[in-house]
Every structure is written in structure tokens, then in C-alpha cells.
Image: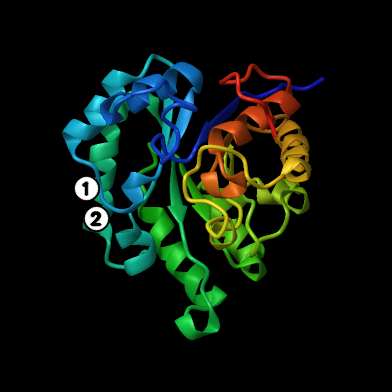
């Protein structure tokens, strides 16, 4: 039997409407969210960095609030991925990496999340990969990166070769515009030295049902079963990072607990699983 690599499971963000009294104790203050979070899960995908680069003091505070062995993943700012799409953003990238380096050994992968590009957007697969091929060689090699696209027809040899050459992981996501995770299990799609999975779901669909995020409102048991099998396969190749979003089923902590149960891991809370 070959090596079995570690799995890190967490949520996208550590603050959400409805988590106090469910995931966090009653009356928990925002300044204490991360501390309570880190008692239950050993990794988090920071969502706030997508909107702006955090200050040095903020990042140092994240470090100080969490125990040894905790890891932060974080989204690269949208200025780089959405507004400039990898061109003319060297200064912004340096500013972001400098801030995030204050996490030291607690810094995990950084996610380059790109939007869906419609024909009206004027960005083709060829254009995108061309930008990527110019951008990736400039990335600092002492950081780990994952890349998310939302155009399934763009997954091809040239994109995968560019990612593999620079050790960037292609993120597997649960999203209507992308292939199912079980369809993305070939060795060639594992382009980095780790696997990065995101249980995203249908944001617009679920926000018609809820915006409070305190309980599961959609039964995604079948999808969680699929993710569990995919994770079991991936961990035989590389370390796996998986993050659940509230939009997946309504309550990210319950989604991650349900996945942990499928994987035979200790759960983060006493709430019932999906």
C-alpha cells in the first residue's frame, strides 16, 4: 500500500450570519471568531482577501490567534484576477504576498480565483492561457498556488501544462459550470504538489432559500458522497485541501462535518450531519 497523504478540511471564511449560537457559542464576539474556529478545524480559506489585501497587523493577529499546526489558505485579491486578469499587477501581487508572509509556517495555498468568461467578455481560452503563461513565471516560488477557472471547455493540454510546469494546482470545484469532481480524477489534472477542492454550490439558487447560513437547507448527500470518494483517491497521490462554502448546502460547518464522517475523521461539532 502506498503513502496516504494528509487531508485538511475547513470552510471558506470564519464569519457568517447565523454561526453564533450554532458553530460558535452564544454571544461570541467577532474578534473571537477565529480563535473558536481554530479549536474545531485546522484550516480555513480566507475569503476577505479577495476584496482587499489585509494589513500586516491583521495577518499577524490571525497568526497569534491560532494554534501551532493551523493553516490558512487565502484568495488572491480580485484586482489581480478579475480587474487586471494577471497583467500589470506586479505591485499588487508583491503587496499581497508581503502581507501574507506574516503567517510564516501557517501559510497554506493561495487561490487565484477567476470568473466565468462569457463570449461577451472578450476573453478566450487562448487569451487566458497566454496571460497565464506570462504571469506564472513571475510568481514567487516559496509560495504555493492553486488556480480556479469556471469555464470547463478551457481545461486542456496547454492550460494543464502551464500549471504543471510551475507547480500550480488546478482547483476542483463543485459548480454548475464545471465538470463533476469524479470527472476530474485523471493524473494529468493533479498539476501541483497538492490537491485543492472547493464545495461551492449554486450561489444564486440557494440565496433564494436562505441568507442566514445557520442550517442545512438543501440535501447534498449524494454530492458529499462523491467528494468523499474523490478525496480518498486524491490523498493517495498528494496532500488534499478541501473547503466548504455556505452556498453548497446552506451551512458550511455541517457540510464539512458530513464530509468528515464519510472519511472516517473526527467531526468538528455535535450538530447532525446532512
- Note whether 42 is above or below 203 in the view shown: above
| Tag 1 residue | 95
Using residue 265 as the reference point, say whether residue 214 is left or right of it.
left
Q: Secondary structure at mark 1?
A: helix
- Note whether 6 is above or below 115 in the view shown: above
Q: Nearer the viewer, residue 189 or 39?
A: 39
Question: Residue drawn at (60%, 67%), measured in percent from left and top?
Answer: 151
Question: Residue drawn at (33%, 68%), measured in percent from left and top?
Answer: 83
Using residue 205 as the reference point, say whether residue 34 is left or right of it.
left
Occupied quadrant, residue 6: top right
Q: Residues within 10 Å of mark 2 (few under 14, many from 20)?
A: some
Cβ–Cβ under 8 Å for marks 2 and 1? yes
Occupied quadrant, residue 65: top left
Tell me where residue 248 appears, x and y as whole percent: 60, 48
Number of numbered tags placed on the structure image: 2
| Tag 2 residue | 92
Tell me where residue 76 appears, x and y as whole percent: 37, 50
Image quadrant occupied by the C terminus:
top right
Using residue 156 as the reference point, say whether residue 49 is left or right of it.
left
Amino acid at each position: 500500500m502506498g503513502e496516504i497523504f494528509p487531508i485538511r478540511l475547513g470552510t471558506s471564511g470564519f464569519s457568517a450570519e447565523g454561526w453564533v449560537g450554532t458553530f460558535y457559542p452564544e454571544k461570541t464576539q467577532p474578534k473571537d471568531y477565529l480563535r473558536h474556529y481554530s479549536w474545531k478545524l485546522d484550516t480555513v480559506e480566507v475569503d476577505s482577501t479577495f476584496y482587499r489585501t489585509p494589513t500586516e497587523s491583521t495577518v499577524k493577529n490571525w497568526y497569534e490567534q491560532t494554534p501551532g499546526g493551523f493553516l490558512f489558505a487565502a484568495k488572491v485579491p480580485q484586482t489581480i484576477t478579475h480587474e487586471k486578469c494577471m497583467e500589470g499587477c506586479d505591485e499588487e501581487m508583491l503587496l499581497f504576498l508581503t502581507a501574507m508572509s506574516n503567517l510564516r509556517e501557517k501559510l497554506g495555498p493561495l487561490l487565484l480565483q477567476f470568473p466565468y468568461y462569457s463570449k461577451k467578455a472578450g476573453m478566450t481560452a487562448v487569451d487566458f492561457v497566454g496571460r497565464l503563461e506570462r504571469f506564472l513565471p513571475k510568481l514567487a516560488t516559496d509560495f504555493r498556488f492553486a488556480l480556479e477557472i469556471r469555464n470547463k471547455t478551457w481545461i486542456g493540454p496547454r492550460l494543464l501544462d502551464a500549471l504543471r510546469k510551475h507547480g500550480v494546482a488546478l482547483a476542483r470545484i463543485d459548480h454548475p459550470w464545471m465538470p463533476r469532481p469524479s470527472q476530474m480524477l485523471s493524473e494529468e489534472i493533479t498539476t501541483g504538489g497538492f490537491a485543492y477542492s472547493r464545495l461551492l454550490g449554486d450561489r444564486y439558487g440557494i440565496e433564494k432559500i436562505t441568507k442566514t447560513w445557520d442550517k442545512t437547507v438543501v440535501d447534498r448527500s449524494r454530492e458529499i458522497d462523491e467528494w468523499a470518494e474523490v478525496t480518498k483517491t486524491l490523498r493517495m497521490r498528494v496532500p488534499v485541501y478541501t473547503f466548504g462554502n455556505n452556498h453548497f448546502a446552506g451551512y458550511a460547518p455541517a457540510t464539512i462535518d458530513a464530509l468528515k464522517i464519510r472519511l472516517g475523521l473526527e467531526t468538528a461539532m455535535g450538530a447532525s450531519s446532512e
